[in-house]
């Protein structure tokens, strides 16, 4: 019960919270991880919340809609703060830095969609910490 | 002219006690008890009573009036000194804020797979890292090409 409450708190105020809460895709149909605290210190992060699931088009559109809504709070359209790719009117990939919720705590939301035989593999991430987008690219980009 | 005498004093007193006396009758009673020296024993208490009534209220002396006009403050009221309490409260607040060891951030690493919670921190961390690598590797040319081929 406490974990559920914490999950909701991690990205409080964001529309994509609905996804993490299982309101779009059921919780038992997704893989979710929530990491907080010193485990993430080496990445200069405080919170990492991820959700991965395979779903149909309607849910994909719902997640897209929520993500676009949260993008309104983006820090800027500069490459330093945002990466985005869309095809055929659908969002396929986005990393967006949001305005800080508190001083020195950067917030990021990430979205990825991959076609999978008329279904879609979606990865959704929320991050919070002192890392910049450049730091995160450097850390997590596959060699 | 009416006068209060030893013969009629009882009548005047009776009227006074009933509250029926006029101001003139009261003045006559005061005058009688103020001036008569050999009062019978039963009337002496009345003499004391009318003597008290005769007393005029004390008027303040000129000096007292001057002191008042000069703004001299009467004796100061005893004040409760607050500053030691305020100082103690400030020190306590300082101690709480700066001397309390910083609260460690809550540490957690949990995961859910198919609705089941996984409390193994290493496994949860791995899932988080894989999701991030999935996201941040998206821009690679190889995956873009794969996506393009898959796209209809």
Image (spheres, rainbow, N blue to C red):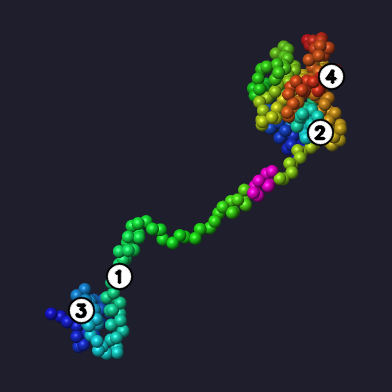
Q: Nearer the viewer, residue A56 or B120?
A: B120
Q: Earlier in the sequence, mark 3 or mark 1?
A: 3
SS under mark 2: helix
Would residue A70 appear left or right of A122 to someone viewing this image?
Answer: left
Q: Residue at x 85, y 34 (%)?
A: B121
How far apart marks 2 and 4 lie (CA) works out to: 20 Å
Q: Is residue A28 visible?
A: no
Would residue A132 appear left or right of B134 to someone viewing this image?
Answer: left
How far apart marks 1 and 4 lie (CA) works out to: 105 Å
Q: What residue is pinned by disc 2?
A: A39
Residue A142: mark in rendering: 4
- Quarter containing the C terminus of chain A: top right
- Magenta residues, start to end: B91-98
Q: What residue is pinned by disc 1?
A: B57
Please report, as a chain letter, where disc 3 is located.
B
**Callout 3 touching callout 1 (CB < 8 Å):** no
């Amino acid at each position: 019960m406490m974990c559920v409450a914490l999950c909701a708190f991690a990205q409080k105020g964001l529309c994509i919270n609905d996804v993490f809460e299982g309101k779009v895709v059921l919780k038992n149909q997704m893989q979710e991880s929530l990491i907080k605290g010193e485990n993430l210190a080496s990445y200069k992060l405080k919170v990492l919340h991820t959700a991965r699931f395979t779903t149909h088009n309607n849910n994909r559109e719902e997640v897209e809609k929520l993500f676009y809504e949260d993008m309104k709070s983006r820090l800027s359209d500069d490459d330093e703060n945002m990466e985005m790719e869309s095809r055929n009117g659908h969002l396929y990939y986005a990393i967006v830095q949001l305005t800080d919720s508190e001083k020195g705590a950067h917030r990021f939301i990430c979205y990825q969609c991959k076609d999978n035989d008329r279904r879609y593999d979606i990865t959704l991430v929320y991050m919070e910490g002192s890392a910049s987008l450049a730091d995160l690219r450097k850390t997590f980009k596959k060699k | 002219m009416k006068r209060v005498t030893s013969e009629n004093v009882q009548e005047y007193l009776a009227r006074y006690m009933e509250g029926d006396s006029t101001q003139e009758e009261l003045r006559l009673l005061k005058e009688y008890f103020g001036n008569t020296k050999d009062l019978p024993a039963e009337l002496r208490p009345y003499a004391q009573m009318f003597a008290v009534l005769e007393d005029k209220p004390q008027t303040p002396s000129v000096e007292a009036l001057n002191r008042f006009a000069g703004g001299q403050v009467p004796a100061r009221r005893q004040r409760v000194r607050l500053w030691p309490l305020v100082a103690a409260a400030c020190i306590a607040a300082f101690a709480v804020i700066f001397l309390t060891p910083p609260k460690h951030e809550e540490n957690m690493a949990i995961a859910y797979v198919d609705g089941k919670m996984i409390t193994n921190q290493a496994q949860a961390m791995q899932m988080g890292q894989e999701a991030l690598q999935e996201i941040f590797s998206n821009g690679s040319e190889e995956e873009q090409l794969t996506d393009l081929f898959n796209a209809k």
